[in-house]
Image: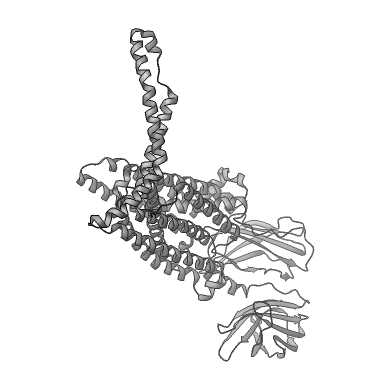
Amino acid sequence: MTTTAPRLGTAVARLLILAAALLGTLLAGAAPASAHAALTGSDPRDGAVVATAPKEVNLTFSEQVAMSADSIRVLDPAGRRADTGEIRDLCSGAVVRYGVGLRAGLPDGTYTVAWQTVSADSHPIAGAFTFSIGAPSTTSVALPEPNAGGGLVGALYGIARYLSYASFAVLVGGGAFVLACWPRGAGVRPVQRTVVRAWLTLTVATLAMLLLRNPYTGSGELSDAFDLAGLKSVLETKTGAALTSRLLLLGAAALFVAVLFGSYTRRTDPKERKDLAYGLGLGGTVVAAGIAGTWALAEHASTGIQPGIAMPVDILHLLAVAAWLGGLTVLLVALYRAPSVERSAVERFSKVAFGSVLVLAATGLYQSWRQVGSWSALTDTRYGQLLLVKIGLLAVLLGIAWVSRRWTQRLADPAPTDPEATSEPAAEPEAEAEAEAKTETETASEAEATSETEAEPEATSETDTEADPQTASEAEPDPERAAQLARQRAAVATARRKRERDADPERSGLRRSVLTEAAVAVVLLAVTTVLTSTEPGRTEEEAGRTGSTAGSAAVPDRPVDIRLPFDTGGVDGKGVVRLSLDPGRTGANALHLFVERPNGKPLDVPEVKVAFTLEAKDVGPLPVAPDRIQTGHWSASGVQIPMPGEWKIQVTVRTSDIDQTTIDKNVKIG
């Protein structure tokens, strides 16, 4: 039986539906405020009650951020601005801290701090918290949701990001496929249209991201996309400069595409063609690396640890993705729209894809170590979980690629020379293909015969009209008959192409496996797009650890209730300690500790110790050894807090003979 491939129209429609559905799911599930930087501390702290009004509010971040004049707002209980609007840069060394001054004479009550900024890797972050002067009070200010980068603008920006990645891969990979694997493909119309459309899509997506950048990192209102003042401020940022550079490089890419599908296809002299191919390859590589660099210079690779190594590695990673997946897309188009693609071209692309996979493995391993940092972050953070999904999809893609390679090897095998061995197998596919095309060809033949029969009286009438010039001048060809003949010729040509395509079972199998590869690649690219806008696992864990000492302060004369996550690193070593100190003031206090598993159930541990330290007065640590009441519950009575102040509470949890950890948190007592 002849192996037949699916129709391209149906296959592409299914592929696009799958891509749209998956991309929508991923974008809907992505946290809009996920980014590289995170708030690790504030002064005053969240929930703190201070005796007198502070002169300013300070925020500390895990990574460098871009602050604007309105990035930090402090609102009084009535919702009025209580800050001066002057942002102060308090960064020192590795500490990233910014502050805003407060107005003098602020009354007692609860104040709201709302902040929004952009992290160094281009993603917006936002948040809000409260503190009180004198005593807590009611407030008319509702804590805003941290919706930076969300809503309709966030969805459109995410779609533009996905299209830019996909079109970059097709543009670069398609050009590389033509130059390195199939030079004759430069003159094939479907290949030309695919690469040109990729260039157009990348250009439009880049322009869309440039216009949406202001509302994406600011108000979230789509109408602000055409705010000229906002666009000007975007152009002054690192991301704006990267997008502008990408547009300029796309101008050079347009010249590359014009020469590749113009002058290069018209060259007949082998030496001239070879020299032009060398120039196109060199120039195209420089332009492609430059466009890839616009991502590396503005996103995750540009910040964090080892950016000097991470950026070149990221460029290599993007180029390898483009060479493999972009070349795969153009190969798929060639296999369906140009059945005469040489088997040697498929073999050459197989070698290029194999080299790209090796580069992807090396660069991906480094990027994973840099962004994840630990085994726990691989499973406990959203970035690590998405990375595992990406690795799984990549494994599936490699498996399908192996199948495609097997089909390629079969294509490359020399045909048997024994006529008896080849005549019978070949006869069946040929007869079957002819049978499939029989209806179309017979219809076309009958139509041509009918048209010839109808043409005879027409010829006679033309002879008769020679004597009558006026009648001859009025005679015109029938446009309906001409259109009918054109449709018949197209049907014959389609039947012939289908017969040629289906007569090669190896090529049909290769088409199906390459189509499946492309479908998985679409999904993989969607996951990668979401991954690039998600806070790396290393940063999320560091922010969590730092957040344990930057939590909310206790209100004077109220019980202290805090939660302290811990991980001793051993078996059954993860959990949460809930600590209660009542009444939470100077003098004697009752201490209760509840040790729980991550699911909230009590965790039985061998030992728990507590210590109190007042670092400002060099008091402590004051040790406390609570007694075990029952599984997961420890308590101590008469815990003495000698003086008021900001105390560090340290809790040591031991889960085995060798596994223990100490966690701490600062609270204001008394």
* Near-viewer residue (436 or 599): 436
In the rendered image, is residue 123 in sight?
A: yes
Q: Please, is residue 454 above or below residue 579 in the view?
A: above
Q: Position of residue 287 (x, y in %)?
A: 36, 51
* Near-viewer residue (281 or 17): 17
Quadrant for the N terminus in the image: bottom left
Quadrant for the C terminus in the image: bottom right
* Near-viewer residue (459 or 35): 459
For the image, the number of numbered tags is: 0
Q: Please, is residue 258 above or below residue 450 in the view?
A: below
Q: Is 581 placed left or right of 179 in the picture?
A: right
Q: Position of residue 451 (x, y in %)?
A: 39, 26
Quadrant of residue 26 in the image? Answer: bottom right
In the rendered image, is residue 237 in sight?
A: no
Name the residue: 68% across, 72% down: 552
Q: Is 449 placed left or right of 418 in the picture?
A: right
Quadrant of residue 639 in the image? Answer: bottom right
Name the residue: 68% across, 91% down: 625
Give the colouring mode of the picture: one colour
Q: Position of residue 471 (x, y in %)?
A: 39, 10
Q: Please, is residue 184 above or below residue 344 in the view?
A: above
Name the residue: 35% across, 11% down: 464
Q: Is 44 placed left or right of 4 in the picture?
A: right
* Near-viewer residue (438 or 257): 438
Q: Position of residue 440 (x, y in %)?
A: 41, 39
